[in-house]
Image: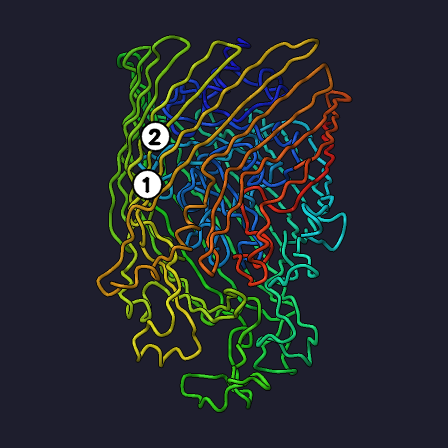
């Protein structure tokens, strides 16, 4: 049994790689544990699914690492998963964009206990990967509430609907029905410059992190009901990594990780009401407050008022994210069909308070703090699933169901002074205001004008509320033709009231040539509907390009501005996915290899920046304060090819046990077509510039390799993890390449079990203090996207961290 279960873990291309994980899982689980993602067959395990599924035991993985958020934990555990910390990226400083296989953040579907989870209301814009994409904020779910994460790395739109082009991540909540488990974590960054004082920091110790979580399980009633409840609190301080001002003239004085405070409460309740009828409920609430520094306004900046800030200032984006989920359902039987009737509700609200700033057109009378408004997204999904098995050949499983989903996106207007430009008399400037009344920069020659709105992040100038609904129906079948060969066929129909219908299908198969060797593969079509934010989002903001402040209008897709340049109405993205691979197991040694091919048409991204001179004359006259405009558009087609590989070996070595895992991902994306209209002929390089293409292609490094070694002797264990991130190339504002060379990060931890109920882990993340490649030649011109000494890349830029984690039970 022991050998079979270790095989089950790794044949699913699991990222479980710790000896303690295997030991605890053997105690608590059975070989036949079902992987509920990717298959609606209740007898299908991770061993015999026709597509790769990772089963990640979050509790055990988190014990050996310095990660306190699910995104960063997966970033350093799953080779095909990428998530970057951002700096100077507006709202993205508070939400880490996450991707599978280098596709967009909105091309991976997130489920909570098998039900569709709501997206974040944030849309990634300036300074971040996945720009132009919405996505899911996985960090709204606390690690302490999670039992495991199942990652389906295969196109699954035919099974689960929109967003599942790259795959599906299913977060499974704790269901323990007794006892209390607590985790206490503390960590800090030990700052040391990677070069000869190229990088400086406020403190030698920063980024101090404190995390406490408590999870309580209890029985409810006498028929097997349970309640499992989690409360968690995380507090993290700034990690500032500036360019040395004695060496470089940088565009920012406060580059680095934001300050954040997170509070969570999650519940998971299941209550049998009678024989064959069970009620379940999942409740979640999280609140995150993040303080991130925007680009520096130096003393002589047009957006500064020296009487207020004689030395310039660093605006602070004070964001508040409130996230709520409430899922309820009934499970029962009807004529031998297992039926699940449910309603899943979610809401994400994101608001901005801009502090330590100014509206320069109000001069010294300006407030220094503004309510800049925000955005919110509500989603409600009502549906049912029905599953039944039939005695056909070696077994036939049929599942069908439907969903009705309602979505509403709102932009929340900020206070007037957060977005308005005022004239010398204190009146709001409009297109009819004479230019001689605009507020000028004193002594400027030629004359320059003060920018309006709160510096760092201008507020939202309009209230917008848009909604839509969608109906879906699906059929998902699996047939075991023989004991060694199975095939799966799925189809899904969806209709959106704002753009029409789509039909997608999937075919998958698995064949076991021997008990040790099996082939698996799939082919499918997929789609992703344009999000409401992509269709209706609009904002005017300031941006530094090559050290110069410009005013950019991000115009909604249905606006007159978009129409004037021939930007077409948004339509769905479509995909064709193919995968093929094998699993091999000899007991001590396992190998899994899965190749994939993903072709996506009409991907929605942000265009490049069109100068005001590119606009028709009448449109220029209506937008006199705008330097540049950009849009959401189905701008590109892409083709992605890659391979996932995991090799693992387990052996009794001396008095202890060693488990070694080598996991790697090779990912190659190319832009096969730029979709321009006739009206944009000759402006293709503006519509999607070389620089924007580089950002899309840099969503994942070409290769990412993870080596994990775990050795356990009695109560003591040591864990070593090394992750190699491949080269990433970006393009600066001057069209020069910014090359981030391959880097290896090393994590080391030591754990000791004082008893079954108490264990302690001490360790270091990024032990050798590795930083991304310093962009020293560009810093003087503010050429990096971040305005700092590096751009946000996969390995992060905070340097070495030391940590301690105490786990206790009673």
What x and y, as percent, mark residue 253? 66, 62
The quarter of the picture where residue 450 lies is bottom right
User: How far apart, in angstroms, are the residues tagged by discs 2 and 1?
Assistant: 36 Å
Mark 2 or 1: the one toward you: 1
In the image, farthest residue toward the left: 678
Q: Of residues 137 and 791, which is closer to you in this image?
A: 791
Identify the residue shown where x is 49% and y is 44%: 728
Q: Which residue is mark 2?
A: 386
- Any mark on residue 639, and which? 1
Q: Please state, as top left, top right, bottom left or bottom right, where the C terminus lies in the image.
A: top right
Q: Is residue 708 above or below residue 194?
A: above
Reading the chain from its start, which is encountered first: label 2 or label 1? 2
User: Is residue 94 in sight in this rendering?
Assistant: no
Secondary structure found at label 1: strand
In the image, taking residue 718 as reference, residue 464 lies left or right, namely left
Identify the residue shown where x is 70% and y is 9%: 655
Q: Is residue 552 above or below residue 26?
A: below
Q: Of residues 366 and 578, which is closer to you in this image?
A: 578
Secondary structure found at label 2: strand
Q: Of residues 179 and 559, which is closer to you in this image?
A: 559
């Amino acid at each position: 049994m022991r050998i079979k279960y270790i095989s089950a873990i790794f044949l699913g291309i699991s990222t479980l790689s710790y000896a303690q994980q295997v030991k605890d899982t053997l105690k608590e689980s059975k070989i036949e544990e079902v992987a509920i993602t990717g298959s609606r067959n209740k007898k299908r395990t991770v061993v015999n699914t026709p597509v790769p599924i990772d089963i990640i035991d979050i509790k055990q993985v988190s014990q050996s690492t310095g990660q306190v958020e699910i995104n960063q934990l997966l970033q350093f555990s799953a080779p095909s998963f990428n998530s970057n910390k951002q700096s100077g990226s507006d709202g993205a400083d508070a939400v880490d964009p996450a991707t599978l296989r280098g596709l967009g953040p909105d091309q991976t579907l997130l489920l909570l206990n098998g039900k569709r989870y709501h997206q974040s209301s944030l849309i990634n814009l300036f300074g971040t990967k996945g720009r132009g994409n919405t996505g899911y904020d996985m960090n709204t779910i606390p690690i302490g509430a999670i039992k495991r994460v199942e990652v389906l790395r295969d196109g699954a739109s035919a099974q689960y609907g929109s967003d599942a082009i790259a795959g599906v991540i299913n977060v499974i909540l704790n269901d323990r029905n007794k006892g209390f488990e607590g985790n206490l974590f503390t960590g800090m960054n030990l700052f040391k410059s990677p070069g000869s004082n190229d990088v400086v920091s406020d403190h030698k110790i920063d980024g101090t992190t404190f995390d406490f979580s408590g999870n309580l399980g209890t029985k409810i009633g006498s028929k097997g009901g349970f309640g499992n409840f989690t409360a968690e609190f995380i507090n993290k301080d700034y990690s500032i990594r500036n360019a040395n001002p004695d060496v470089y003239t940088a565009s920012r004085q406060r580059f680095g990780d934001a300050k954040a405070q997170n509070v969570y409460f999650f519940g998971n309740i299941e209550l049998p009401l009678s024989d064959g009828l069970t009620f379940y409920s999942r409740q979640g609430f999280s609140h995150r407050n993040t303080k991130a520094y925007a680009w520096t306004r130096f003393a002589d900046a047009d957006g500064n008022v020296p009487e207020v800030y004689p030395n310039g200032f660093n605006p602070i984006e004070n964001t508040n994210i409130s996230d709520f989920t409430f899922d309820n359902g009934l499970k029962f039987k009807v004529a031998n069909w297992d039926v699940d009737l449910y309603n899943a509700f979610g809401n994400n609200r994101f608001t901005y308070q801009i502090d330590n700033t100014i509206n320069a057109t109000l001069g010294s009378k300006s407030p220094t703090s503004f309510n800049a408004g925000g955005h919110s997204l509500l989603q409600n999904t009502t549906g049912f699933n029905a599953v039944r098995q039939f005695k056909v050949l070696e077994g036939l499983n049929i599942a069908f169901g439907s969903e009705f989903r309602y979505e509403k996106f709102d932009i929340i207007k900020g206070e007037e002074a957060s977005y308005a430009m005022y004239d010398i008399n204190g009146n709001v400037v409009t297109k009819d205001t004479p230019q001689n009344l605009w507020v000028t920069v004193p002594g400027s020659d030629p004359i320059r004008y003060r920018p309006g709105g709160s510096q760092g992040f201008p507020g939202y100038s309009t209230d917008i509320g848009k909604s839509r609904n969608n109906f879906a129906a699906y059929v998902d079948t699996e047939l075991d033709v023989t004991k060694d060969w199975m095939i799966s066929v799925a189809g899904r129909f969806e209709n959106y009231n704002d753009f029409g219908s789509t039909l997608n299908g999937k075919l998958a198969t698995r064949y076991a040539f021997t008990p040790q060797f099996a082939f698996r593969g799939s082919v499918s079509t997929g789609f992703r509907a344009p999000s409401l934010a992509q269709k209706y989002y609009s904002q005017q903001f300031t941006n530094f390009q090559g050290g110069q402040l410009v005013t950019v209008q991000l115009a909604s897709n249905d606006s007159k501005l978009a129409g004037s340049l021939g930007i077409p109405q948004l339509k769905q993205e479509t995909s064709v996915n193919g995968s093929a691979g094998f699993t091999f197991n000899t007991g001590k040694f396992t190998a899994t290899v899965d190749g994939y091919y993903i072709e996506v048409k009409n991907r929605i991204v942000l265009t490049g920046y069109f100068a005001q001179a590119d606009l028709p004359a009448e449109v220029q006259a209506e937008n006199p304060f705008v330097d540049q405009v950009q849009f959401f558009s189905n701008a590109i087609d892409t083709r992605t090819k890659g391979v996932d590989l995991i090799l693992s070996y387990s052996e009794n070595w001396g008095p202890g046990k060693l488990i070694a895992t080598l996991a790697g991902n090779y990912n190659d994306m190319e832009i096969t077509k730029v979709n321009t209209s006739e009206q944009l002929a000759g402006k293709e390089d503006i519509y999607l510039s070389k620089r924007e293409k580089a950002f899309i292609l840099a969503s994942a490094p070409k290769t990412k390799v993870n080596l994990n070694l775990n050795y356990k002797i009695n109560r003591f264990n040591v864990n070593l993890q090394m992750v190699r991130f491949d080269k990433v190339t970006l393009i600066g504002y001057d069209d020069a390449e910014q090359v981030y060379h391959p880097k290896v990060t090393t994590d080391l931890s030591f754990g000791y079990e004082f008893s079954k109920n108490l264990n302690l882990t001490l360790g270091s993340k990024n032990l050798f203090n590795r930083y991304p490649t310093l962009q020293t030649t560009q810093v003087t011109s503010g050429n990096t996207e971040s305005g700092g000494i590096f751009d946000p890349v996969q390995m992060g830029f905070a340097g070495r961290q030391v940590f301690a984690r105490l786990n206790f039970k009673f």
